[in-house]
Image (spheres, rainbow, N blue to C red):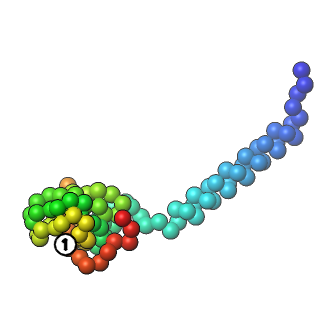
């Protein structure tokens, strides 16, 4: 039975290491410019949109920073109104209407 040369094993190991290194660098540079997404403090000041009509003082859904959140507002909000986060509570966000538009929805 013919055996594979040891040099071929080394070649495959080196090529695999190079490919793994390139993929690692690609993910590193891709992720480098993204905003941190951990911690509640990152939500303060973020701008998003109401995903439904929200009566004043009632909970409703808002889309902020790439996620759906339960939110409450002191004023009536219509679907797609722009909102800014002013407080972060355990189960919901407190938002206020704003004229600024979110970066991306």
* Left or right relative to 46: residue 15: right
At 89% across and 35% down in the image, what residue appears?
5
Residue tagged 1: 96
Residue plotted at (16% across, 67% down): 77
Q: In this orientation, which residue lies closer to the viewer: 20 or 83? A: 83
- Say left or right for 37 vs 96: right
Q: Is residue 9 above or below residue 20?
A: above
- Eyeballing the image, is 16 above or below 25? above
Q: Quadrant of residue 13?
A: top right
Pick the residue in front: 54 or 73.
54
Horizontal side, residue 62 vs residue 56: left or right: right
The residue drawn where x is 33% and y is 61% is 39
Residue 7's x, y, as percent?
Answer: 87, 40
Location of residue 52 with respect to 86 vertically, above or below: above
Nearer to me, 65 or 28:
65
Q: Is residue 10 left or right of residue 16?
A: right
Image quarter of residue 84 = bottom left
Nearest the eye: 31 or 54: 54
Quadrant position of the C terminus in the picture: bottom left
The residue positioned 29% from the left and 67% from the top of the image is 48
Residue 11: image location, x then y, percent: 82, 44
The answer to whether residue 93 is seen in the rendering is no
Classify residue 40 by image quadrant: bottom left
- In percent of width and height, residue 76 lies at 12, 68
The answer to whether residue 91 is visible is yes
Name the image quarter holding the N terminus: top right
Provide residue 33's location: percent of width, then percent of height. Answer: 50, 68
């Amino acid at each position: 039975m013919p055996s594979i040369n040891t040099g071929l094993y080394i070649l495959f190991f080196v090529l695999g290491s190079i490919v793994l290194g390139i993929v690692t660098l690609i993910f590193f540079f891709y992720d480098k410019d993204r905003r941190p997404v951990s911690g509640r403090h990152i939500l303060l000041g973020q701008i998003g949109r109401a995903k439904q009509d929200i009566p004043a003082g009632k909970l409703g859904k808002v889309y902020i920073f790439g996620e759906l959140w339960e939110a409450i507002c002191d004023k009536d909000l219509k679907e797609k109104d722009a909102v800014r986060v002013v407080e972060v509570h355990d189960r919901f966000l407190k938002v206020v209407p704003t004229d600024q538009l979110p970066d991306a929805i």
